[in-house]
Amino acid sequence: MTLDIFSNGLAINPTTPHHTPQQKDNKMKTYQNHIEGYPTFIIWEGECYCIDCANKFAQEEHEDKDITEDERIFSRPGDAGISEVINWESTDLYCSSLHGCNERIEAAYE
């Protein structure tokens, strides 16, 4: 098995099914808290974000008419380099303290 290792020590299996964020009619992404019952989180530029923060950022970007489509990260319909993955076993995984809420992200198997 091959794992992708991030700078924060997080390892994920790239063959794990990744969830495609839902697109609403207004083209804003919404992220789901679970994939097939397993808890998920977002990885963007080496930082982890809980689903609540990712959806909050997407909503804020969607409502901000002063930023261009290229400046949008969480809300644009194209690929912005965001991965939505399952937290299988990490009990010390937290939402980014830089931009997120710094809350613990639930693990599937604790």
Image (cartoon, rainbow, N blue to C red):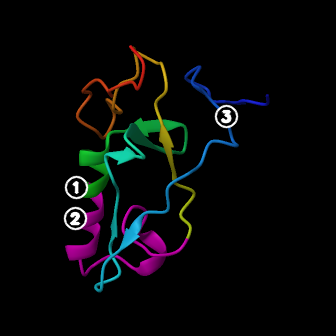
User: Where in the figure is residue 75, as x and y percent of width and height?
Assistant: 36, 68
Task: Tell me the kind of residue under disc 1.
Answer: Lys
Mark 3 vs 1: CB contact within 8 A? no
Q: Amino acid at mark 3?
A: Asn
Residue ID at (33%, 28%): 105
Tell me, yes or no, whether the highlighted magenta stretch contains residue 73.
yes
Find residue 76 and report its image quarter.
bottom left
Q: Is residue 79 above or below residue 81?
A: below
Residue drawn at x 33%, y 53% as measured from the top left: 32
Residue 36 lies left or right of residue 13; in this view the side is: left
Q: Identify residue for label 1.
A: 56
Q: Residue 57, how many percent across, how many down?
A: 28, 57
**Dot 2: few (<14), some (14–19), or many (≥20) neighbours within 10 Å?**
some
Labels 3, 1: front one: 3
Mark 2, residue position: 60
Residue pointed to by mark 3: 13
Q: Which residues are magenta?
A: 57-78
Give the image location of residue 65, x and y in percent.
Answer: 24, 81
Instruction: Using the image, determine if residue 96 lies above or below residue 109.
Output: below
Q: SS of the residue at dot 1?
A: helix
Q: Which mark is residue 15?
A: none
x 32%, y 74%: residue: 28
Q: Nearer the viewer, residue 69 or 31?
A: 31
**Callouts 2 and 1 close, C-beta under 8 Å:** yes
Label 2 and label 3: CA atoms lie apart by 31 Å
* For residue 5, side relative to residue 46 (left or right): right
Of the 4 image quadrants, the one containing the N terminus is top right
